[in-house]
Image (cartoon, rainbow, N blue to C red):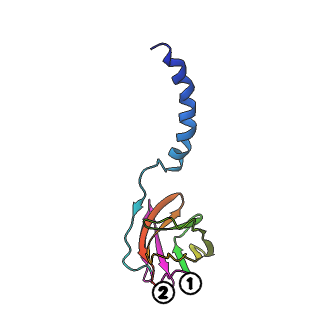
């Protein structure tokens, strides 16, 4: 047992270095909450911790056709959006939204098309370090 203590003492700083930044940022590796929005074109309110944001598509999401995503949250820091097809890797679809007005962020989104015809997507929004997943269905062409 005495031989294991030096190893554990060497391992402790490594574990702290790997885990401490995630604990400080509030992302302890737990699951990201999924929020259901019946119609993203109509928009919906999403809670990001203590902050509420309005999330809205300005037109129906269609693969290979650009549409705008608007997030309204007063005094919010940078907003990012990642889009992933459910059950299939479609590559990175990461967007950093641009501030368009006080408390409003906008991104011009382009989804890739899937040859299998699947159109179920999940948008992961990050606002002030808090992530929320919103599933949606893209309009088939």
Label total for image: 2
Give the residues in magenta: 41-65
Q: Nearer the viewer, residue 61 or 125?
A: 61
Give the residue number, with chain letter if any, for mark 1.
65
SS at badge 1: loop
Q: Using residue 21 as the reference point, say whether residue 137 is left or right of it.
A: left
Give the residue number, with chain letter if any, for mark 2.
141
* Cβ atoms under marks 1 and 2 closer than 8 Å: yes
Report, in whole angstroms, how far the alpha carbon at label 1 lies from the one at label 2: 9 Å
Q: Residue at x 49, y 76 (%)?
A: 115
The correct choice, above or below, for 26 with respect to 62 in the image is above
- Marks 1 and 2: which is nearer the front? 2
Of pointers 1 and 2, the one earlier in the residue sequence: 1
Q: Residue at x 45, y 63 (%)?
A: 132
Q: Which disc number belongs to residue 91?
A: none
**Residue 63 on the magenta span:** yes
Measured as percent of width and height from the top left, residue 90 is found at: 53, 68
The correct choice, above or below, for 123 with respect to 27 in the image is below
Determine the residue located farthest toward the front in the rendered image. 116
SS at badge 2: loop
Measured as percent of width and height from the top left, residue 80 is found at: 57, 66
**Residue 112 on the magenta span:** no
Measured as percent of width and height from the top left, residue 64 is found at: 56, 81
């Amino acid at each position: 047992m005495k031989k294991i203590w030096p190893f554990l003492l060497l391992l402790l700083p490594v574990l702290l270095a790997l885990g401490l930044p995630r604990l400080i940022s509030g992302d302890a590796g737990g699951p990201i909450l999924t929020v259901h929005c019946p119609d993203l074109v109509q928009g919906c309110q999403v809670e990001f911790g203590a902050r509420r944001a309005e999330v809205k598509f300005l037109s129906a999401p269609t693969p290979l056709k650009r549409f705008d995503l608007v997030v309204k949250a007063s005094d919010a820091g940078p907003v990012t959006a990642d889009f992933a097809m459910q059950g299939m890797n479609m590559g990175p679809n990461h967007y950093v939204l641009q501030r368009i007005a006080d408390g409003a962020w906008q991104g011009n989104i382009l989804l890739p098309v899937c040859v299998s015809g699947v159109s179920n997507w999940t948008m992961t929004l990050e606002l002030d370090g808090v992530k929320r997943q919103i599933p949606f269905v893209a309009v088939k062409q």
